[in-house]
Image (cartoon, rainbow, N blue to C red):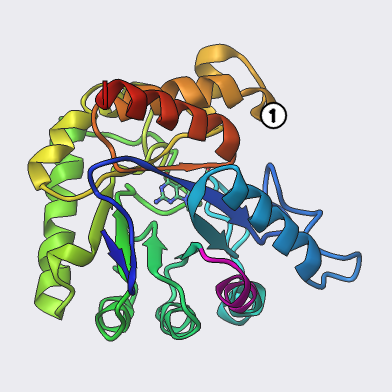
Amino acid sequence: MNFAGKELDPATPHVMGILNITPDSFSDGGELFSENGKLLLDKIMQRAEAMQQAGAAILDVGGESTRPGAKPVSPQEEMDRVLPVVELLSSNLDVIISVDTSSAELMRASAGLGAGLINDVRALQKPGALEAVAETQAAVCLMHMQGQPSTMQNEPEYHDVVVEVKEFLNQRIAGCEQAGINRERIIIDPGFGFGKTLAHNLELLGRLSEFKQLKLPVLVGLSRKRMLGTITGRPEKDRVAAGVAAASIALMQEVSIIRTHDVAETADAVKLYRALENK
Ligand code: 8Y7
């Protein structure tokens, strides 16, 4: 897997650490902003370095909260949050920088500052997004979502969730290829929790290996999500063990990247999986 020049071994899984630059983020926001809303770049750098040392090969920087019902941010505000962080990390850390955005303008600007991956929960469906990524060397993660973040949890429906998510991803892959983004740059993600009931999420988790049919690296984000709370009865901060358990189930189905808030714990699961594979 190539990320604008930085390589990761595709034969073994990797951890992506989440760096949310949103004051309203549910688990790690707030402390990264001062009282008057300025970015605390020294704190952000500390958080990033800690995640890298704990085993993250990729850091996912996001300035727009996509949790169900979140307030939208203006494109300018998203840029003001994310770009200084991309610049800071790319000049100070040897890590792959991912930018969690749907905005073509931010995709272009962050790739220019050294981002190696565009992580788009809207799978490059916003105007200009396909073209923006095509102009860069960055890889892209295409995620499936049914509906929009504000309404996606209102009775989502599928005939066969795995088949429909695969069909959607196949269409987006074709769109990428037509726009000049070749398959070597594409990662796919079923989008746990994005317009899915608990039953849909469990169906996807149990049948993740079917996504291998698309012959592209698979990324999954499960950490601290509501499905884990529903199953365990635990609040967000106490879902780490459930998240690592879910990650292990995904690892056994040969996913390539695990996106997580809990890098050290997830990196241990990856080590266990690698030890098993190399036995
Ligand atoms: C995912 C994601 C979120 C995910 C990818 C959360 C930005 C909600 N979830 N990106 N983003 N996959 N690719 O709980 O599952 O982290 S936001």
Element at label 1: helix
Q: Position of residue 272 (x, y in %)?
A: 41, 23
Q: Position of residue 55 (x, y in %)?
A: 53, 44
Q: Nearer the viewer, residue 262 or 242?
A: 262
- Residue 30 location, quadrant: bottom right
Q: Residue at x 45, y 73 (%)?
A: 115
Q: Nearer the viewer, residue 157 or 57?
A: 57
Residue 107 sits above or below residue 238 on the image: below
Q: Is residue 132 visible from the viewing direction of this image?
A: yes
* Picture quarter with the N terminus: bottom left
Q: Is residue 92 left or right of residue 170?
A: right
Q: Nearer the viewer, residue 171 or 214?
A: 214
Q: Residue at x 45, y 34 (%)?
A: 222
Point out the stretch of residues depicted in magenta.
Answer: 85-94
Q: Position of residue 104 (x, y in %)?
A: 40, 80
Question: Mark 1 is on which residue type?
Answer: Lys
Residue 237 sits above or below residue 212 on the image: above
Q: Which residue is mark 1?
A: 237
